[in-house]
């Protein structure tokens, strides 16, 4: 399976984002498309997933929280993709912990905007704190792809907030570039890079799964999440790896091997699992 290249990592460090082309194989991509469409239908018909779905500034549903806790057969296996395990080991460290996941979607016709922002929980030093954004659809300027301001992950907070304010008055920020994606591509975006997207007035659906990850050692320093959350999330990742191992895609040719960081729990098949593993469980 494809691995992130050193050049791609270098690009990320300089720009605060990088587009990795052609990561997913066709079998996984088709399943991702089907299952995410089913969840969006469930939201639109007021089913259980609707209660987990946030509305954007226009009042339109666009953000499904805690994706793994919304019963589906793709998201845990997607998290367990070896491309992800490999890049997190190399870019974050072997003590990485997947901390959160969501499905963002722009409905056709009038899909939610996402005003310019840095992601929540963005207080960090120089660590590589980023999201892994996986696309099942074409995401283009026409269907309101994400725009980023390259290099803004290195800006002081004040400069970034000033630009956010400006971008909320006029979306067209100087030096902003569109992150145009194809199905199966993966975008990495630093939580501090300025990013946002406009209303989708095209007739195309545009979806993306976001995975947020941190090193356990960084969390000890920054205390973004309680110890209990980190333990739960560590178990959840091991559960996800086992899900993919049990239900491989025909194209799978490797399984990612993860060793839980020292002091964190080992999850064994058959052990109970909390698929929600709420980030604020100790808050
Ligand atoms: O997919 C998008 O348009 C942006 C979503 C985003 O940045 C967020 O939810 O934090
Ligand atoms: Fe964001």
Image (cartoon, rainbow, N blue to C red):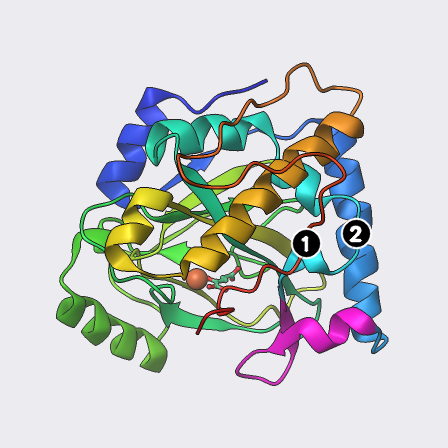
Q: Pinpoint residue 185: horizontal percent, then vertical percent.
A: 56, 36
* Magenta span: 48-64
Q: Pinpoint residue 152: horizontal percent, then vertical percent.
A: 23, 55
Quadrant, the N terminus: top right
Tell me, yes or no, whether the two marked residues, 2 and 1, touch with CB atoms within 8 Å. Answer: yes
Q: At 63% from the left edge and 70% from the top edge, which residue is drawn?
A: 62
Residue 93 badge: none
Q: At 33% from the left edge and 82% from the top edge, which residue is drawn?
A: 169
Can residue 140 be spotted in the picture?
A: no
Q: Is mark 2 within 8 Å of ligand 1?
A: no
Pointer 2 local density, CA inside 10 Å: few below 14, some 14–19, many at least 20: some
Can residue 250 be spotted in the picture?
A: yes
Which quadrant of the render holds ligand 2?
bottom left
* Residue 186, placed above or below residue 191: above
Residue occupied by mark 2: 72
Q: Under tag 2, what secondary structure?
A: loop
Q: Quadrant of residue 81?
A: top right
* Residue 171, placed above or below residue 184: below
Pointer 1 local density, CA inside 10 Å: few below 14, some 14–19, many at least 20: many
């Amino acid at each position: 399976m494809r691995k992130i290249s050193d050049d791609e990592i270098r690009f990320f460090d300089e720009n605060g984002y990088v587009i990795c082309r052609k990561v997913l194989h066709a079998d996984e991509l088709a399943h991702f498309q089907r299952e995410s469409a089913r969840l969006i239908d469930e939201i639109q018909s007021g089913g259980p997933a609707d209660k987990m779905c946030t509305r954007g500034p226009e009042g339109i549903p666009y953000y499904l929280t805690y994706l793994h806790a919304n019963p589906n057969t793709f998201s845990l296996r997607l998290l367990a993709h070896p491309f992800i395990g490999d890049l997190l080991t190399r870019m974050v460290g072997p003590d990485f912990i997947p901390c959160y996941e969501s499905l963002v979607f722009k409905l056709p016709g009038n899909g939610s905007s996402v005003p310019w922002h840095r992601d929540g929980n963005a207080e960090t030093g120089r660590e590589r704190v980023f999201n892994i954004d996986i696309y099942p659809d074409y995401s283009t300027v026409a269907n309101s792809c994400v725009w980023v301001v390259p290099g803004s992950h290195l800006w002081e907070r004040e400069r970034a907030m000033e630009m956010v304010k400006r971008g909320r008055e006029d979306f067209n920020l100087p030096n902003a570039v569109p992150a145009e994606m194809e199905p199966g591509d993966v975008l990495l975006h630093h939580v501090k890079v300025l990013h946002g997207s406009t209303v989708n007035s095209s007739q195309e659906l545009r979806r993306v799964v976001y995975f947020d990850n941190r090193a356990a050692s960084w969390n000890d320093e920054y205390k973004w999440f309680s110890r209990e959350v980190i333990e739960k999330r560590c178990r959840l990742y091991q559960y996800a790896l086992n899900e993919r191992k049990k239900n491989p895609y025909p194209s799978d040719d490797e399984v990612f091997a993860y060793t839980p960081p020292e002091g964190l729990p080992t999850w064994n098949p058959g052990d109970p699992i909390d698929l929600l593993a709420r980030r604020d469980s100790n808050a």
